Image (spheres, helix red, strand yellow):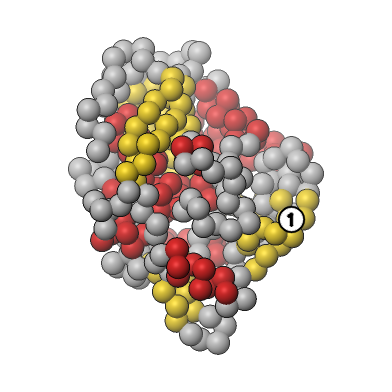
């Protein structure tokens, strides 16, 4: 899709590229070629000082788009000689936020948005193709997390390009796959113990299954941490925020997703219409907190940078 994108030495900055709009994972597995092509863009930023070829972190934002604390993490990487690529999934599609509906831009779309840069930036003469990591926050954390699920990467990057490390911040990990086949790359999940937006219990439970399957995955939990614990914004309750329930949906080998209601009814979750039907059951939780804590912020910045330095430098 982006085979014609090539780079010269010292070429960085604004990059336009092609992505796709698969609505759910099912479309990635079964209908990716037919999915609508999306004009996308991002920013490749080189560090002021560092050793070429640079390691790289591809960054994915949350459901409220890019935020200040995301940029603080990126600046930490840059100040330590690590390049960053900032994918603009929402801005490319003319969307400001999906906090209240989670309908207009999906994880599946954002997966393509980050894997395509993984592929074409692997050809950049100033970047180390073997040291491209991924990080993301909330919705973007889900992208960074499931980019370690090997079956979906085999569909998105059939030539074998893979991320060398994964750093999801407070990811929604409610899709429990039938096939626990994961990347061998290190994965560090940063979660808050008091997160009522994307519950940490799901992260801890799925990571237990991943470890049994041989994944190199860890969970670092910040005590009394809420969603967006690395933000400077004070703790705030958002009554219209669509939050994640503390139960898994089933992710099958063909990419299809099945949601089980509290009454035991199985509902497919493979299209826009399916999502609306699930919302109409009344089982979707609205209302959640987000906000930072000064001590946790400092710890989170340290944990994130230490992880990237360990695996990229």
Of all residues, the one furthest to the bottom in this rendering is 263
Residue 255, horizontal then vertical, whole percent: 33, 64
Number of numbered markers: 1
**Image coords of residue 253 (percent x, y):** 30, 67
Rendering quarter of residue 198: bottom right
Q: Quarter of the image containing the N terminus?
A: top left
Which residue appears at 78% of the width and 49% of the height? 235
Asked if residue 7 is positioned above or below residue 26 in the image, the reply reads above
Given residues 15 and 168, the one toward you in this image is 15
Q: Residue at x 47, y 74 (%)?
A: 259
Image x and y of residue 99, in percent: 62, 53
Which residue is labeled 1 in the image? 238
Left/right placement of residue 300 relative to residue 150 reads right
Asked whether residue 234 is in view, the answer is yes
Name the one closer to the observer, 272 or 126.
Answer: 272
Per the image, label 1 sits on a secondary structure element best described as: strand
Is 13 displayed left or right of 200 in the figure? left
**Left or right: 87, with 225 as reference point:** left
Q: Is residue 202 left or right of residue 254?
A: right
């Amino acid at each position: 899709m982006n085979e014609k994108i090539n780079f010269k030495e010292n070429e960085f900055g604004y990059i336009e590229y092609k992505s796709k709009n698969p609505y759910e994972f099912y479309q990635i597995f079964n209908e990716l070629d037919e999915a609508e092509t999306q004009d996308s863009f991002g920013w490749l930023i080189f560090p002021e000082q560092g050793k070429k070829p640079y390691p790289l972190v591809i960054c994915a934002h949350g459901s409220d788009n890019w935020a200040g604390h995301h940029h603080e993490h990126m600046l930490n990487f840059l100040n330590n000689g690590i390049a960053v690529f900032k994918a603009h999934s929402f801005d490319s599609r003319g969307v400001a936020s999906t906090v209240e509906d989670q309908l207009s831009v999906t994880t599946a779309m954002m997966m393509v948005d980050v894997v395509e840069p993984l592929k074409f930036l692997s050809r950049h003469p100033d970047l180390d193709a073997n040291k491209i990591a991924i990080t993301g926050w909330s919705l973007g954390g889900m992208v960074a997390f499931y980019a370690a699920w090997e079956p979906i990467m085999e569909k998105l990057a059939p030539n074998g390009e893979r991320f060398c490390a994964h750093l999801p911040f407070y990811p929604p990990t409610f899709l429990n796959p039938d096939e626990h086949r994961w990347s061998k790359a290190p994965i560090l999940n940063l979660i808050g113990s008091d997160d009522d937006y994307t519950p940490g219990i799901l992260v801890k439970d799925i990571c237990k299954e991943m470890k049994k399957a041989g994944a190199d995955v860890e969970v670092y939990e910040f005590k009394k941490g809420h969603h967006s614990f690395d933000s400077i914004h004070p703790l705030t309750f958002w009554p219209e925020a669509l939050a994640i329930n503390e139960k898994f949906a089933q992710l099958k080998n063909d990419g299809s997703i099945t949601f089980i209601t509290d009454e035991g009814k199985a509902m497919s979750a493979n299209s826009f219409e399916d999502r609306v039907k699930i919302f109409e059951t009344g089982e979707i939780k609205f209302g959640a907190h987000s906000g930072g804590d000064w001590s946790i912020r400092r710890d989170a910045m340290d944990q994130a940078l230490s992880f990237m330095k360990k695996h990229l430098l």
